[in-house]
Image (cartoon, helix red, strand yellow):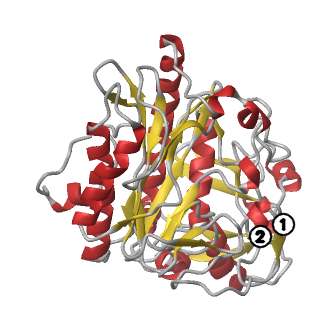
């Protein structure tokens, strides 16, 4: 929420172009209280979430800050840091404490995008699958109430992290030409262990994203958390520039079926959002997603939809065994979903994954599909049914990526990555004891709920 805080909180307090800081000053317990109240803020928008903090801060010119910490223990390098950082993309922070031994301070520079996020400014709307952009929201007959917002610049990946071949030009040439595109690869035990490691990283990243979801948080902020978590694990976020996708995670809100692009829209109480994460760890891919509730006011119908998507996935996993046709999973999923009063989206499917982001087999989620191949030990693949509250049909926004339900009704999805063994499928991306709870785990037990 930093960009919105800067625009709504900091900018009105000073003259444009004036260098300075927001100063929060007082006894330690007061500052702790303000911090806790702000972090726990449940307001529906950024302005209300930061109201307490804004009431306690005042604008202080840079010259006054420099004079305040001059000669203070820990202040070395502060003026040089201010001169070197980029105020268009970063912020500087300094903490000063009065101890029994005297004053001391700590200073740092952090990332942020403090440009305006209104319908003007440097951020752009994504067009043509990420190959181009527009300064205006494209005219389009949107099916639901959701609209695209502006998208922040692409986030950097350090040189120390290995990058896929599409990092620069957006074209996954190795994947497109690999034999695995037409024949499901069989992983060796050593390769399977590498995929397990990647999947554990993926689970940690999804859980980190889940923890920050609440009303007022932008999907761009979720992308920042996900991107930074990848870097922490020395992993590359596979969606970033894959076929020109501009972000490190897919965030699909309400009627978005899949491939939603993180932007500056603030999540609202009552939304649902799917987080789809795909890290590359030492050359091996993980792929998983889950749909979560935003705030306490999510409707019973949306909750039922989320639960139906989750349970359909788990029933399909239970049906996996060596010799099973991949095409048969569609009937299992469709039977459960239709029984709940919903429809299975037919456009997108599960897929093989491992050394490549997408490979054989393709795994449709609807009944009566004609998918090839049977399951064999060593096959690594995803099942990821997208379940729509209304019609199964979807359409695409002008950005070329965002798939939405054609009738504007909500959609939900869950995805696990699986490794076929001798007696069944191992869930490589299973939830952990530390994973944030899903809605039914908070509201109490639900009948016939499979256990991950």
Coordinates of residue 76 in the picture (x, y in percent): 78, 43
Q: Residue visible at 83% across and 55% down?
A: 82
For the N terminus, the quadrant is bottom right
Q: Residue visible at 32% across and 18% down?
A: 422
SS for dot 2 = strand
Coordinates of residue 107 in the picture (x, y in percent): 69, 49
Tell which of 385 and 227 is nearer to you. Answer: 385
Q: Which mark is residue 176?
A: none
For the C terminus, the quadrant is top left
Contact (Cβ within 8 Å) of mark 2 with mark 1: yes
Q: Which mark is residue 132?
A: 1
Total residue callouts: 2
SS for dot 1 = strand
Q: Residue visible at 72% across and 57% down?
A: 246
Q: Residue 149: in sight, yes or no? A: yes
Please say if 163 is above or below 8.
above
Tell which of 237 and 269 is nearer to you. Answer: 237
Q: Residue 96: in sight, yes or no? A: no
């Amino acid at each position: 929420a930093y960009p919105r805080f800067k625009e709504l909180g900091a900018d009105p307090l000073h003259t444009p172009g004036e260098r300075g800081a927001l100063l929060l000053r007082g006894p330690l317990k007061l500052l702790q209280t303000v911090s806790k109240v702000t972090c726990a803020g449940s307001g529906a928008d950024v302005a209300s979430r930061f109201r307490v903090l804004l009431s306690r801060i005042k604008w202080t010119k840079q010259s006054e800050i420099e004079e305040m910490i001059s000669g203070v223990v820990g202040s070395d390098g502060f003026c040089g840091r201010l001169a070197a950082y980029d105020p268009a993309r970063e912020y500087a922070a300094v903490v000063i404490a009065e101890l029994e031994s005297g004053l001391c301070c700590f200073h740092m520079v952090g990332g942020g995008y403090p440009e305006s996020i209104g319908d003007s400014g440097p951020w752009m709307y994504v067009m043509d699958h990420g190959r181009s952009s527009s300064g205006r929201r494209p005219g389009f007959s949107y099916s639901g109430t959701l609209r695209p917002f502006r998208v922040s610049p692409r986030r950097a990946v350090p040189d120390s992290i290995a990058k896929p071949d599409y990092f620069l030009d957006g074209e996954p040439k190795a994947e497109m030409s690999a034999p695995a595109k037409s024949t499901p690869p069989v992983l060796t035990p050593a390769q399977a262990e590498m995929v397990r490691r990647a999947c554990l990283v993926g689970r940690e990243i999804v859980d980190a994203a889940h923890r920050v979801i609440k009303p007022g948080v932008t999907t761009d902020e979720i992308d920042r958390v996900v991107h930074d978590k990848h870097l922490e694990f020395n992993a590359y976020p596979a969606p970033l520039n894959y076929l020109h996708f501009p972000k490190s995670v897919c965030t699909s809100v309400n009627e978005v079926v899949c491939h939603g692009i993180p932007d500056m829209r603030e999540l609202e109480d009552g939304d649902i959002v799917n987080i789809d994460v795909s890290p590359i760890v030492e050359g091996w891919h993980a792929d998983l997603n889950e749909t979560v509730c935003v705030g306490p006011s999510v409707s019973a119908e949306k909750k039922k939809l989320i639960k139906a998507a989750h349970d359909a996935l788990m029933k399909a996993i239970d049906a996996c065994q060596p010799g099973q046709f991949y095409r048969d999973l569609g009937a299992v999923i469709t039977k459960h979903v239709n029984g709940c009063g919903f429809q299975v989206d037919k456009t997108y499917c599960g897929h093989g994954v491992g050394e490549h982001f997408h490979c054989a087999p393709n795994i449709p989620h609807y009944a009566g599909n004609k998918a090839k191949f049977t399951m064999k030990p060593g096959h690594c693949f995803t099942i990821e049914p997208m379940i729509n509250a209304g019609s199964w049909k979807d359409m695409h926004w002008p950005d070329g990526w965002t798939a939405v339900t054609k009738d504007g009704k909500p959609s939900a999805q869950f995805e696990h990555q699986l490794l076929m063994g001798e007696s069944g499928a191992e869930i490589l991306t299973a939830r952990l004891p530390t994973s944030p709870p899903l809605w039914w785990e908070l509201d109490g037990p639900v009948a016939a709920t499979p256990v991950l």
